[in-house]
Image: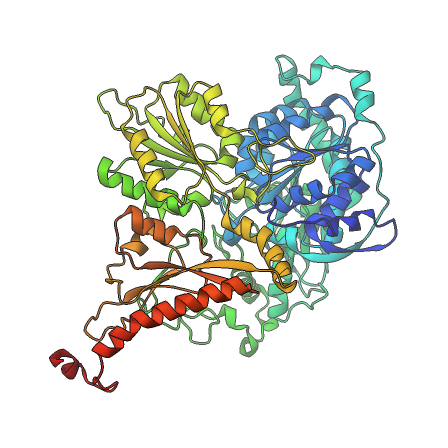
């Protein structure tokens, strides 16, 4: 199950033409696709647009009514290759995935698509995962668009602008026979707003017509000499057509042009942040009316030279907001201005930072510096926002109020009750006997193992590349294997071929652990081939162990309960000491506790409300038994395990304690047993709506415990509660 359901929201996709649509950015994108007459949609889930795939999945009935085919693609490359349907036929197709890593995976298919060109509109919706909200390396999509000569749209964060960009994207693609990239930033995907709807359209040309009337055009296939012609086509035909379309439709916007003799050029995606900065400086209002001319690049490639020259002709200076590096747009505009002999001076990375996200603070400071240079009289120096103050100023909203070391850093880690935590607990226990190994990590929740308290993992090369990342560590003179990890999502993405198949083919002596929680957790909880759930529109329940044996793995074991730490530890030892040639694969299965909780908590609450018996398990630590060694914390790292003051006045060491956030997974007790730690953990059952039998058993237990405790009370008879430590010692 995905982490969020859109079953109710997708009904908004049926809103007829002329009405006002209110909703989230990703819903608006889906509505725009349907309004554009899209024929097929595919993609690979992943932040920041993972929910777009979830919306499409939940709207499958609506898509089917309109004759739209939707696929959850195996990878970004699979999705990109789908667009081949638009090469020879007037079929509108859209794909979506996270950039830049998704674009990298899809690069082969996209490069071939851009070379041969398209007949139908081909739209690639990429989530620009950059800056503070990013989960990946800091790179941009812009370079790929330039390299392959695909047009790049970057609409301002406004639902009307986003919907228009989807529709313009298809038209621009068809008009210039070129695939178009639509870049959506994290905040654009999840902002809320409204737009006026149009009617949903069935595709004017159907896939059935294409299949029954096949076409081919050898000049569209990327083989010499056609490929040489494609390069000339891009420059001499497709780009001029694209530029003319962008100018005719006025996709880029000029705001308040002519008000001042200096201006601002900004990427569309940064528009809201720039306007907020102007507003904070008193140079714009909340409705977007600016005192300074603004040129909004809703198309960031190609840059329209005529528009830049027009905007710059009566200005002394321009400030360009281009987030990230290298400064592709700045170099492009510099070239345009110099070739046109324009006198306007272009500022960009000299006033703003070269790298890093353009946050409101960064943008506002850059605006302030720029305006001070060209119109200082516009700045009210006594009324500046606090964010432009020096970081060490006490008035700065982000000023550090504590000295270093007062608050200890707590690294991010696994959720409470996570079934992946015991995997690494078991590995640490196994390494007591086998010694340490080089560990090649992978993308997913399990990557938290590289941080304390586990400190397991040396590298990560990409999604599903944990096994491939260990390929270089092979030596016939060493009997010690390398360890590799990957998740089940990464396994089906490309790990089976690039990792397991590669290891079998090269007879690699490695132990691969596939962390299997029955869905692609790294991308939002979507079903995959090995999911245990029944999926009405997908084929599931295909075991990972069967797949690895199918490509030649001889040693493979599936562990169905990762909370059995001692069993998992023994499995690790067996694999790490096995003399079986070739790779060894351990499939570690357990359902994500968060997912299980999302499913079970509403059912438990309903049962409790109906007066039915509901049992919840909690764990605790006996303060008199705990030694204060804290090995349990070092082996587990569970957020529910903490320390508290020792109740024994004769002992100073703080003892371990279990917080109320405990979900009763039992790992702390399993670790204590497997590692032969102190027996201080106990399990408690919290029963709602207890039966008569529950009450009877509880009364018997209380009576028995009271009898056992009475002897302790007699031993301490005569000791006053206020007795000092010295008196207790003498006693």
Q: Is residue 250 above or below residue 235?
A: below
The residue drawn where x is 33% and y is 49% is 671
Q: Is residue 465 above or below residue 373?
A: above
Q: Quadrant of residue 558?
A: top left
The residue drawn where x is 30% and y is 30% is 574
> Residue 483: where, in percent of width, then height?
34, 33
The residue drawn where x is 49% and y is 31% is 491
Position of residue 433 in the picture relative to residue 25 (left or right): left
> Residue 352: where, in percent of width, then height?
50, 56
Please state, as top left, top right, bottom left or bottom right, where the C terminus lies in the image.
bottom left
Please state, as top left, top right, bottom left or bottom right, where the N terminus lies in the image.
top right
Q: Nearer the viewer, residue 371 or 219?
A: 219
Q: Nearer the viewer, residue 177 or 719?
A: 719
> Residue 640: where, in percent of width, then height?
40, 60
- Colour basis: rainbow
Direction left: furthest residue? 730
Q: Nearer the viewer, residue 53 or 652?
A: 652
Q: Quadrant of residue 222?
A: top right
> Residue 271: where, in percent of width, then height?
64, 56
- Please give the count of numbered marks on the rendered protein: 0
Position of residue 244 in the picture relative to residue 263 (left or right): right
Answer yes or no: is residue 379 visible.
Answer: yes
Answer yes or no: is residue 365 visible.
Answer: no
Position of residue 413 in the picture relative to residue 632 (left or right): right
Q: Quadrant of residue 699?
A: bottom left
Q: Is residue 657 above or below residue 160?
A: below
Position of residue 201 in the picture relative to residue 325 (left or right): right
Q: Nearer the viewer, residue 682 or 499?
A: 682
């Amino acid at each position: 199950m995905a982490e969020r359901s859109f079953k109710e929201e997708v009904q908004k996709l049926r809103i007829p033409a002329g009405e006002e649509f209110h909703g989230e950015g990703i819903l608006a994108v889906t509505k725009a696709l349907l309004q554009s007459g899209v024929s097929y949609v595919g993609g690979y889930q992943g932040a920041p647009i993972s929910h777009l795939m979830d919306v499409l999945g939940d709207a499958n009935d609506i898509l089917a009514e309109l004759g739209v085919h939707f696929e959850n693609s195996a990878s970004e490359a699979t999705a990109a290759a789908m667009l081949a349907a638009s090469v020879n036929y007037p079929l509108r197709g859209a794909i979506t995935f996270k950039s830049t890593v998704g674009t990298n995976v899809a690069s082969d298919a996209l490069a071939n698509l851009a070379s041969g060109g398209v007949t139908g509109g081909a739209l690639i919706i990429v989530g620009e995962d950059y800056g503070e909200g990013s989960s990946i390396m800091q790179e941009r999509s812009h370079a790929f668009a330039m390299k392959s000569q695909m047009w790049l749209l970057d609409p301002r964060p406004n639902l009307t602008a986003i919907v228009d960009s989807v529709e313009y994207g298809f038209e621009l693609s068809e008009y210039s026979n070129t695939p178009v990239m639509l870049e959506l930033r994290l905040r654009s995907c999840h902002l809320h707003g409204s737009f006026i709807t149009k009617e949903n359209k069935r595709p004017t040309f159907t896939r059935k017509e294409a299949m029954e009337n096949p076409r081919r055009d050898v000049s569209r296939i990327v083989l010499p000499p056609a490929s040489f012609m494609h390069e000339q086509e891009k420059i001499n035909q497709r780009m001029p057509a694209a530029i003319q379309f962008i100018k005719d439709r006025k996709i880029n916007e000029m705001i308040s042009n002519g008000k001042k003799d200096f201006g601002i050029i900004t990427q569309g995606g940064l528009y809201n942040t720039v306007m907020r900065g102007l507003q904070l400086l008193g140079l714009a209002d909340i409705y977007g009316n600016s005192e300074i001319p603004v040129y909004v690049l809703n198309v960031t490639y190609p840059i329209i030279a005529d528009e830049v020259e027009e905007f710059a002709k009566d200005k002394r200076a321009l400030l360009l907001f281009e987030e990230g590096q290298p400064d592709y747009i700045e170099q492009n505009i510099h070239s345009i201005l110099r070739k046109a002999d324009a006198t306007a001076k272009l500022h960009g990375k000299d006033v703003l930072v070269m790298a890093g996200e353009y946050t409101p603070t960064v943008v506002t400071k850059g605006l302030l510096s720029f305006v001070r240079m060209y119109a200082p009289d516009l700045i009210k120096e006594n009324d500046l926002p606090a964010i432009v103050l020096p970081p060490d100023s006490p008035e700065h909203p982000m000023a550090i109020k504590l000295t270093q070391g007062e608050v200890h850093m707590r690294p991010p880690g696994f959720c409470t009750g996570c079934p992946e935590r015991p995997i690494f607990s078991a590995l640490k226990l196994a390494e007591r006997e086998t010694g340490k190994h080089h560990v090649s990590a992978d993308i997913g929740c399990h990557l938290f193992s590289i941080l304390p308290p586990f400190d397991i993992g040396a590298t990560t090369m990409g999604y599903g590349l944990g096994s491939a990342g260990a390929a270089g560590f092979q030596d016939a003179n060493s009997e010690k294997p390398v360890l590799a990890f990957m998740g089940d999502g990464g396994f089906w993405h490309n790990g089976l071929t690039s990792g397991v198949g590669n290891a079998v083919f090269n007879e690699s002596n490695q132990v691969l652990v596939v962390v299997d929680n029955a869905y692609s957790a790294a991308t939002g909880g979507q079903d995959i081939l090995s999911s245990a759930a029944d999926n009405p529109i997908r084929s599931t329940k295909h075991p990972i162990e069967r797949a690895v044996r199918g490509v030649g793995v001889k040693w493979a074991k599936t562990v169905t309960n990762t909370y059995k730490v001692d069993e998992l530890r023994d499995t690790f030892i067996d694999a790490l000491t096995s003399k079986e040639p070739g790779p060894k694969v351990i499939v570690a299965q357990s359902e994500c506790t968060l997912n299980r909780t999302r499913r079970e908590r509403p059912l438990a609450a309903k049962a409790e409300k109906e007066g039915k018996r509901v049992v919840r398990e909690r764990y605790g630590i006996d303060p008199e038994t705990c030694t204060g060694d804290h090995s349990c914390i070092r082996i587990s790292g569970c957020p529910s395990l903490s320390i508290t003051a020792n109740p024994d006045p004769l002992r100073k060491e703080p003892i371990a304690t279990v917080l109320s956030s405990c979900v009763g997974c039992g790992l702390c007790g399993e670790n204590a047993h497997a590692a032969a730690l102190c027996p201080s953990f106990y399990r408690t059952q919290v029963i709602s709506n207890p039966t008569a039998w529950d009450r009877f058993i509880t009364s018997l237990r209380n009576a028995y415990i009271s009898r056992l405790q009475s002897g302790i009370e007699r031993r301490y008879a005569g000791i006053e509660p206020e007795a000092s430590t010295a008196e207790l010692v003498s006693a």
